[in-house]
Amino acid sequence: MNTTRIAKVIMPFALLLIISMPSCYYDNTEETYPGGVPCDTSAVTWTLDIQPMVNGHCSGCHNGTQQFDISTYASVKAIVIDGRMMQAMSMMQGMPKKMPPGYSLPDCTLLKTQLWIDQGALEN
Ligand code: HEC
């Protein structure tokens, strides 16, 4: 019968299929989450995320003797409200008031901190 006509109809779809195939290879977890660890932002809390981060990276200096205190929830909340916490933490490396000085926290930590602030910086 009319095989040429059928071929003409099928050909564009066949080509499309072939062209779109290589994209499957890029659809893997390593590519989507560099390092293999996704950033879990589903439930960010003061107790499990922010307090350990502040204890580990901030209150060593900000303990009230060398620098103003940010070792308690209330004192952290104060620098959240005046906007200085995220401002200091998201500065580029090398800026004088970049916090913590000398190294950068992982993007995931910054993302979680921003989320916690956006959700009202609760003592949760
Ligand atoms: C190695 C010690 C050290 C660590 C760790 C550190 N800071 Fe600081 N921080 C300082 C010093 C010193 C200043 C004063 C800098 C200045 O005024 O030039 C400062 C200033 C600040 C300021 C005020 C900036 C301004 O605009 O005046 C904020 C806010 C701050 N730190 C937040 C943090 C946070 C949040 C962390 C943890 C993520 C942190 N710091 C970790 C030493 C530290």
Image (spheres, rainbow, N blue to C red):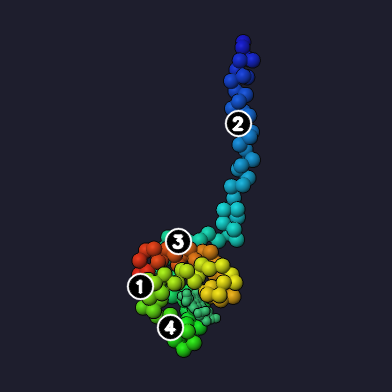
Q: Quadrant of residue 79?
A: bottom left
Number of other residues with Cα within 10 Å of mark 4, as a class: few under 14, some 14 to 19, many 20 or more: some
The answer to the question of whether label 4 and label 3 lie on touching residues, with beta carbons closer than 8 A, is no
Q: What mark, if any, has residue 69 been given in the picture?
A: 4
Q: Residue at x 43, y 80 (%)?
A: 70
Give me the residue at 62% from left, 24% from top. Answer: 11
The dot on residue 41 is 3
Up/down of 62 relative to 91, above or below: below
Density class for disc 1 (Cα within 10 Å; few <14, some 14-19, many ≥20) is few
Q: Residue 94: where, in percent of width, then height?
A: 60, 72
* Label 2 environment density (alpha carbons within 10 Å; few <14, some 14–19, many ≥20): few
Which of marks 2 and 4 precedes in the sequence? 2
Task: Tell me which numbered mark, 2 or 3, is placed earlier along the sequence.
Answer: 2
Amino acid type at mark 3: Thr
First in sequence: mark 1 vs mark 3: 3
Label 4 to label 3, Cα distance in Å? 27 Å
The residue depicted at 46 percent of the width and 89 percent of the height is 65
Under mark 1, the amino acid is: Glu
Give coordinates of residue 111: x percent, y percent.
Answer: 48, 63
- Residue under circle 1? 123
Give percent across and percent down for residue 72.
40, 80
Q: Inspect the image, locate mark 4, and give the three-letter code of the amino acid beneath it.
A: Asp
Question: Which mark identifies residue 16?
Answer: 2
Secondary structure at badge 3 equals loop
**CA separation in Å, label 4 and label 1:** 17 Å
Q: Calculate the distance from the C-alpha at mark 1 to the C-alpha at mark 3.
A: 17 Å
